Amino acid sequence: MWTVTLADLRMRARQFAVAVLGATLVFAMALIMAGLAGSFDAEARRTVASVGADSYVVGSGVGGPFTSPAALPGRMLATIRHEPGVLQADPLVVQPSLAVSTPTGKQFVHLIGVRPDGLGAPHVGTGRPLAGAGQAVVDDITKLSVGQTFSIGPHRFTVVGTVHGLDYLAGVPIVFLTLHDAQQAALGGHRDMTAVAVRGIPQSVPHGLTVMSADQARQDILVPLQQAKGSISTIRNFLFCVAVVIIAVVVYLSALERRRDFAVLKAIGSSTRWLYGGMAVQAATIALLSGLLALAIEPLMAAGIPMQLAVPGSARAALPVLALAIGLLASLAGLRQAVRADPALAFGSA
Amino acid sequence: MALLDVHDLVVEYISGDYVVRPLDGLNLAADDGELVLLLGPSGSGKTTLLSCLAGILTPTSGSITVAGRQVTALDAAALARYRRETVGVVFQGFNLIASLSARENVGVPLRLSGRRGRDIRSRADALLDSVGLGDRLGHRPGQLSGGQQQRVAIARALALNPPVLLADEPTAHLDHVQVEVVVGLLRRLAAPGRTVLVATHDDRMIPLADQVVEMAPKLTAEVVAPARVELKKGELVFAQGSRGTLVYVVESGRIEIVRELANGSEERLALVGPGEYFGELGPMLGLPRSATARAMQKSVLTSYSARDFRHRAGAGERERIKLIEPRTAASPRRERAASATK
């Protein structure tokens, strides 16, 4: 079976190369889609982890500290700091999806106001940490460099440092300001806060407030992305279907061209199972080769996408297995030809 | 007992709307080591018979016994094994697998039989060497001449050393030099331990054969005297699918020519009246009757041998015989589908 199968693959190399190319691109796209969905989880995890809080105190009924902020009176902070279970508590001012004007134009960012020495203060990659008024630390997705300026309404800020990988809601970068500046820019100058980041877990909180774990805060970030993730998953499934179709078409056409071969092979004693086995091996070979090539070219394709993709290791590991299954599914397209091949056809003249 | 015995074999199938019976009660016996020639024109049932002998086509009735085993009684698995081990087939047009080399083509039946690696290679090489292609082992069919491809096909058919070798029109695509090589090879292969059956319309092979089976009656050179045939209403002149040697001219009465359809009904093709003739093509071409001829009323015909009829028609008697649609050919007596002559 291997001899006949591989010889046919060799003879129809161009035909199969086209199928491999098509299936490779489709598999790579599917990996990128997995990376896109994975990036939503990864960015949420990084953002929440960067704050360093075990829990957050927010207003009752609020979805989470990063997505649906509601102002809390600043005086509440002292109360929370005295609650049992609280090791450290620092105020945050969060304003998601805020438009800022940069030298290159308007862009949307998430604004987070922090105390420079408190929980949530960013660890800069380049430049220096936040130290005072008018300063900002930005994620490098903004393309802003140290020394550049941007404005939020009438307020102007200078970038003193940059961080990498602090973004959420599908790659929207975070801009860190001092608490005071954030109150000016987002809360009209009121000395309020939108959440309290806590090391430890408060045993109780004042009426009208509630405690969320860091994990709940992370889950909350993902809520607005559920539909997007669902759509990505659907597109991924479509892509796998396209891969099935590409391979199936080639296998089917090959089977059509090989009808006389099948008839001859049956006439000299081969079984339908043997013939189908050959086609299954061909389809699986195309699919597996495509899967492996997709793993190789996915990073090259991902480099052209302006988001930090996070292809889960499980998706990479599963691809060859999935490709194999896709190949076997596609090979069913040729099964009918193998079953219907009439050995009597072998007696016809060429 | 003969190595190969075919008894009262009938093959019937539906083609379009009507029933075709390419084999009708064929009998054949071949001994071990014989070269049997199945001789006849296209459509005479040669390939149909080979398909039955190869276990590819199930006959409508009758039996085929090879080496004491009744082929027509085998189940699917046993039939596949029979095709692998008992018969080797050399197909018309070679039918080699284009993607495989000569060695790989010959190796296919060996792989199918479960042999492995070196064993296959050495057997394939030996077979190709024996047919004079020891220096073409790695060549694909496209790189070989017709004769060379035919020899690869023969080597493939011999891979599992079957006791019966079937060859369908082995000289059809070859020039005279290649014909000589292939025919000589087939003659050599017909030796104790192996019977070779060759289906061909090429009568140049006759001198080499141990037995010739005429798959269709030949237009005999013998001129049979014209005979008067009297028919009652409804009586058959000949039946569709039968074979015959006579052509009929209607003297009086009326003859209906009908084709029997697959659903059991009949389609009328023509009504033949006094001065008209019918049934000439079957005897002349060696084909079975393609329709049934039946008397519509009390009728009188004159029967002629085909050669006599052709002679008379050419000599001016045509003026007396009115041409109608020449669709059928005839004999009131059913004849054997094939006659074996040793």
Image (cartoon, coloured by chain):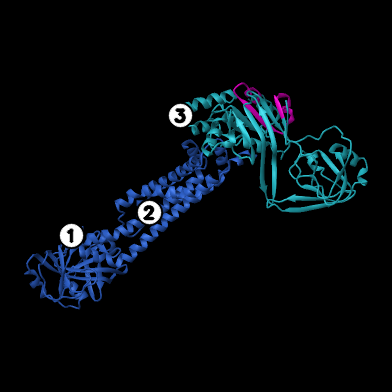
Chain colours: A blue, B cyan
Q: In front here: B183 or B320?
A: B320
A262 versus B133 height, above or below: below
**Residue range corresponding to the magenta coloring:** B186-212
Please identify, in this view, whether the residue under mark 2 or under mark 1 is nearer the observer. 2
Q: Position of residue A200 (x, y in %)?
A: 11, 63
Q: Which residue is mark 3?
A: B117
- Camera-near label (1 vs 3) is 3
Mark 2 on the same chain as mark 1? yes
Name the kind of residue labelled 3 in the image.
Gly
Q: Are marks 3 and 2 in contact (CB under 8 Å)?
A: no
Q: Which residue is mark 2?
A: A301
Image location of residue B93, percent across then percent down: 64, 36
Q: Residue at x 36, y 60 (%)?
A: A233
Amino acid under label 2? Met
Asked if disc 2 and disc 1 are in contact, CB closer than 8 Å, the reply is: no
Asked if the stretch drawn in magenta spans residue B228, the answer is no
Q: Which mark is residue A64?
A: none
Q: Secondary structure at mark 2?
A: helix
